[in-house]
Image (cartoon, grey):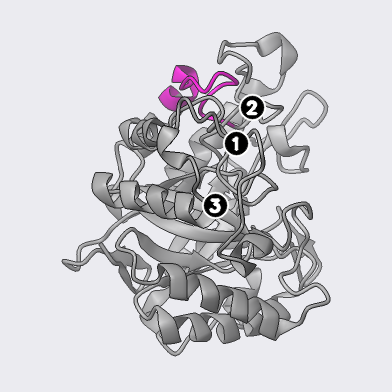
Amino acid sequence: MYLTTSGNHILDAAGRPFRLVSVSWYGANEDAFVPHGLWAVNWRDALDSMKAMGFNSLRLPLSGVLADSLMRWPKRGVIDFARNPDLVGRNAHQILRLILDRCAEIGLRVILDMHQRTETSGIDGDPLGSSGLGHWVDLWRRLAGAYGGHPAVVGAELYNEPHTLDWGTWASYVEACGDAVHQIAPHWLIFVQGVATHDGVTYWWGGNLRGVAERPVVLRQPDRLVYVAHDYAHTSGGAPWLRSLVNRVADYPANLIEIFRANWGFVFERGFAPLWIGEFGGSFGFDDRDGTLAPASWPDYLHERAWLEALLRFCAPEGHEGISMGYWCWNGGGGQPYGLTDARYVPQAGKLALLRSLLKARG
């Protein structure tokens, strides 16, 4: 199950190019301490749904608080025990291990993502806060000790959207942390996100990898490094390169190719390391309550679909050997317009149809 890298490719155990086609299942990074939706669905059914959609890997967001204690308990009320009777009496990490066991059974590889420092801090911008580098490294040592031998877990995404850091500082942090993780879990891939601003150029949080050109990350195990970028469109807000009703970009969506290339695509094209678009997504004109088309409530949905088509074409010129991708997110509802399921946790057929080319190209 474990993966390695060579040039700009991720390789499976047989040495064949493997393209991560991932989906995030969030919630354990928040005060629930377990993935959201267990109040509405059975946890096995949720994982089986992701596999049936066509994903080959799962990104599991966690928090530093959850990593800090292996005895954290789920928040009261976030699990329907009638639907999930085998979760009764289990703490959050015991539930996480059950999820990982099921992933191994059905062939979903798992990337553990430290999404935020605490269960309430949200996207806080840097992994240290007031605690220092050693504390963050120790959290990852603890996770590596707990899950480093699990056959489903293939890597560690060291921190989510470090948008308050400059690239040089962030690169030095991840080298220290990645090397420490490899002392315990030497087979794990180390996933390193971009920042927000480099040399005065600002892009999506986690999406700016421009600093790699002059200052690449160097791990003691170089065949375990994967760079990560996030990219979004209209659902996440306006950007000058996105055409909308109020922003008439004449060459849209053709202009997006150079935007992608300049901020993160060059990493793959120039062979620095493999690349994973760890988060992308949108509403694309669908109502998150029931998955129906609601174009009147989202007038720019056609422009967002054009962005998605451009992104998919750019990332998959070589099928299995293209850029890996990870959709945000599986779970919907509750004001989460990106979800591949709606508020009832029913798969959104319309969104899945837009992702058809990606879901057919998994490794």
**Compared with residue 167, is residue 57 higher up or lower down, i.e. above or below?**
above
Side of 322 relative to 178 (left or right): left
**Compared with residue 130, is residue 56 higher up or lower down, i.e. above or below?**
above
**What element does badge 3 sit on?**
helix
x and y percentages locating residue 17 in the rendered image: 26, 61
**What element does badge 2 sit on?**
helix
Q: Nearer the viewer, mark 2 or mark 1?
A: 2
Q: Are marks 2 and 1 in contact (CB under 8 Å)?
A: yes
Q: Residue at x 39, y 49 (%)?
A: 98
Please state which amino acid type lies under the numbered disc 2: His
Whether residue 270 can be seen here: no
For the residues marked 2 and 1, what is the alpha-carbon distance in whole angstroms?
8 Å
Q: Earlier in the sequence, mark 3 or mark 2?
A: 3
Q: Which mark is residue 303?
A: 2
Secondary structure mostly seen in the magenta stretch: loop
Side of 268 relative to 295 (left or right): left
Which of the 4 image quarters holds residue 236?
Answer: top right
Q: Which residues are magenta?
A: 339-353
Q: Residue at x 71, y 18 (%)?
A: 298
Q: Which residue is mark 1?
A: 253
